[in-house]
């Protein structure tokens, strides 16, 4: 069942979202060649707790980190560890925060030093795919209009749109109904209503849309080892249009 949030609940989710936004700004400034994915995770946890939040991901389903840190061909759910970021890599960081019992969830993909033009375009186009999806999160639209708009933008550019992992509702729980694919035909699913809160998260690959889950049962990689990027925001559907909860006003 899709849960509609009251204005008071949306305000609490905004607070959680603002923590996530600040953590991502903190991490963006820390990304450099030589840092390890574990160090990124430690920075994320320190900042989350320093802002009075509980890390959403730590222990969730047994996940061992406070941030998912996915490098190059890793699509999502990268486990922080000893991997060292190198010049030319790209890194996707997914962070969640719990504040007053409500969740915020967002992901960003950043270049590590100077990266190839193709990698720059992948990052920029994935972010743009998110913007397009958010623009369709409006009262009266159908749920599938979001994913259809993302697919219609991404595939003509040659990207593989990941199908095995999707966006989701969010609120007191990290994952609520509905699931929100980044592909498919428009005009299907429930009508969007004010008070819905959605985590929209396109994942685009330079090659195939197909992915593989590694033996650690968490890390997802592209089947052809091509680069992947991931952008996500928590969005509230309001009478005035989509409200992005995981971005600061100056973003």
Image (cartoon, rainbow, N blue to C red):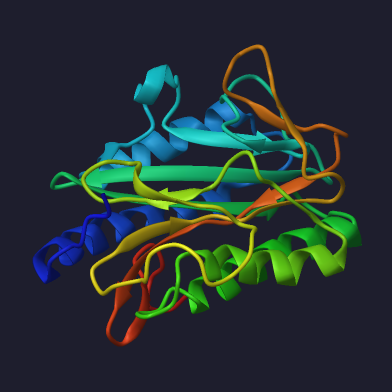
Q: Is residue 3 visible?
A: yes
Name the spot of residue 203 as percent of width and height, x first: 65, 51
Residue ID at (29%, 64%): 196
Residue ID at (79%, 37%): 86
- Figure disc tally: 0
Residue ID at (18%, 62%): 5
Q: Is residue 137 above or below residue 227?
A: below
Name the spot of residue 181 as percent of width and height, x first: 56, 53
* Residue most extreme to the left: 8
Name the spot of residue 71 as percent of width and height, x first: 71, 37
- Viewer-side residue, 163 vs 217: 163
Residue ID at (63%, 39%): 164
Q: Is residue 221 above or below residue 251?
A: above
Q: Is residue 66 above or below residue 161?
A: above
171 left or right, relative to 120 = left
Q: Is residue 124 visible?
A: no
Name the spot of residue 124 as percent of width and height, x first: 72, 67
> Which quadrant of the structure image shows residue 137?
bottom left
* Residue most extreme to the front: 188
6 left or right, relative to 127 = left
119 left or right, relative to 211 = right
Q: Is residue 24 above or below residue 32?
A: below
- Viewer-side residue, 18 vs 182: 182
> Which quadrant of the structure image shows residue 235?
bottom left
* Residue most extreme to the top: 215
> Which quadrant of the structure image shows residue 159?
bottom right
- Viewer-side residue, 70 vs 140: 140
């Amino acid at each position: 069942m899709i849960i509609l949030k009251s204005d008071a609940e949306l305000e609490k989710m905004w607070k959680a979202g603002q923590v996530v936004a600040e953590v991502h700004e903190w991490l963006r400034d820390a990304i450099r060649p030589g840092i390890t994915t574990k160090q990124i995770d430690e920075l994320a946890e320190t900042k989350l707790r320093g802002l009075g939040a509980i890390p959403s991901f730590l222990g969730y389903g047994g996940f061992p980190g406070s941030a998912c840190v996915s490098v190059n061909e890793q699509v999502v759910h990268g486990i922080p560890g000893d991997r060292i970021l190198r010049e030319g890599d790209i890194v996707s960081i997914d962070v969640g925060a719990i504040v007053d019992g409500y969740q915020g969830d967002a992901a960003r993909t950043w270049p590590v030093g100077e990266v190839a033009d193709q990698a720059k375009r992948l990052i920029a186009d994935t972010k743009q795919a998110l913007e397009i999806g958010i623009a369709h999160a409006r009262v009266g639209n159908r749920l599938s209009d979001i994913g259809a708009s993302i697919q219609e933008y991404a595939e003509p550019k040659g990207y593989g749109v990941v199908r095995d992992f999707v966006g989701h509702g969010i609120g007191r729980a990290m994952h609520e109904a509905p699931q929100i694919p980044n592909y498919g035909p428009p005009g299907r699913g429930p009508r969007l209503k004010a008070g819905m809160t959605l985590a929209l998260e396109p994942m685009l690959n330079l090659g195939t849309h197909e992915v593989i889950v590694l033996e650690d049962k968490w890390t997802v990689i592209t089947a052809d080892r091509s680069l992947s990027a991931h952008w996500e925001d928590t969005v509230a559907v309001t009478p005035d249009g989509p409200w992005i909860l995981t971005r600061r006003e100056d973003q």
